[in-house]
Image (tube, rainbow, N blue to C red):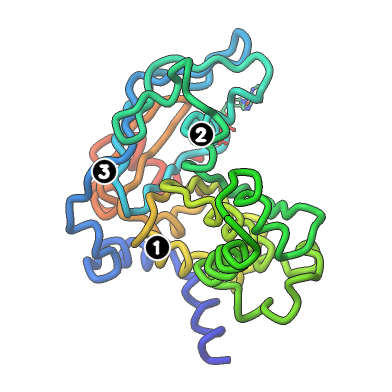
Amino acid sequence: MDMLAGKVKMTTQTLDAAMDAAMNPAANPAALIEHPIRLTARDVTVHYGAKQALHGISIDIPDRAVTAFIGPSGCGKSTFLRCINRMNDTIEGAKVGGRIELDGEDIYAPDLDVVELRARVGMVFQKPNPFPKSIYDNVAYGPRIHGLARNKTDLDEIVVNSLRKAGLFEEVKDRLAEPGTGLSGGQQQRLCIARAIAVGPEVILMDEPCSALDPIATAIIEELIDELRTNYTIVIVTHSMQQAARVSQKTAFFHLGNLIEKGDTEDIFTNPVNKQTQDYIMGRIG
Ligand code: ADP
């Protein structure tokens, strides 16, 4: 109970406290280490029909760290996130320009297998969206499609390991055959994270993964993100500056389709260079 109370307190901390958290090197140890670059974006543009949503975004995203995209609603955070696993391909009228590389490979190359890319770059959405299937089948779905298991024993192992990594196994181990949709919101979101993990991704994209969750479920997901960053490259869109300060080591601030400022989370929150970033951090825009 004390632990839960602590989590709620952490989740509702003030921006000042969030800034303190970002300033405290112990809270963001990865900020002190230079991680190799996993993803590079250069001059990325997106048009929806005639409307330009992104204007030449360039950023390097490091391995095994959390990069947060922050900025006012409608500034292009989700649009850019969707460029990283080519989800914008599925939106009629969307046109992506520029170049994005994953481990040096152009992800928009004509011969690139998009289904394989989306296994390498998994996505977790705002609203938990488990399939109308059992907990087991939700996680087994991807490995089955991609032929990752030779037999039932292999598949069982992938499912159990993925649920463990998503911090859900202990809560669901006795009801794997029950529908995923019967879980609580926070559990459903962890199930979706397990589903993404099951196909062995390198990068996990999260689009406001806590916006539909209560403070306790949010705190659990944030702790999970912190654990996952030791094995994955994580990019998270969040409208909560406190969340960005708590979970990320790198932050990128977007405004009106432009990437205004990027850098170590600690620097962005405590010493932003750009006036627009300062205004956003201080709550004057957004
Ligand atoms: P954010 O994630 O920062 O809230 P979005 O990437 O969702 O911003 O949106 C950026 C801009 O692109 C907004 O003006 C939005 O209206 C527009 N937009 C987003 N998705 C679509 C779409 N599917 N079709 C047309 N316009 C879109």
Whole-percent x and y of residue 83?
49, 29
Which residue shows up at 70% across the image and 65% down it? Answer: 136
Crowd rating for badge 3 (residues with CA inside 10 Å; few <14, some 14–19, many 20+): some
From the viewer's perspective, is residue 74 above or below residue 195? above
The amino acid type, in three-letter code, at marker 2 is Asn
Between residue 177 and residue 64, name the one nearer to us.
177
Numbered badge on residue 246 = 1
Q: In which of the image's four quarters is ligand 1 placed?
A: top right
Q: Quadrant of residue 109?
A: top left
Front disc: 1 or 2: 2
Between residue 138 and residue 46, name the one nearer to us.
138
Q: Quadrant of residue 191?
A: bottom right
Q: Which residue is mark 3?
A: 263
Q: Quadrant of residue 29?
A: bottom left
Precedes in sequence: disc 2 or disc 3: 2
Which residue shows up at 54% across the image and 51% down it? Answer: 199
Precedes in sequence: disc 1 or disc 2: 2
Instruction: Specify whether 131 is left or right of 243.
Output: right
Quadrant in which the N terminus appears: bottom right
- Circle 1 sits in a helix, a strand or a loop, which is it? helix
The amino acid type, in three-letter code, at marker 3 is Gly
From the viewer's perspective, is residue 214 above or below residue 145? below
Numbered badge on residue 222 = none
Mark 2 and mark 3: Cα distance apart in space: 22 Å
Q: Which residue is mark 2?
A: 85
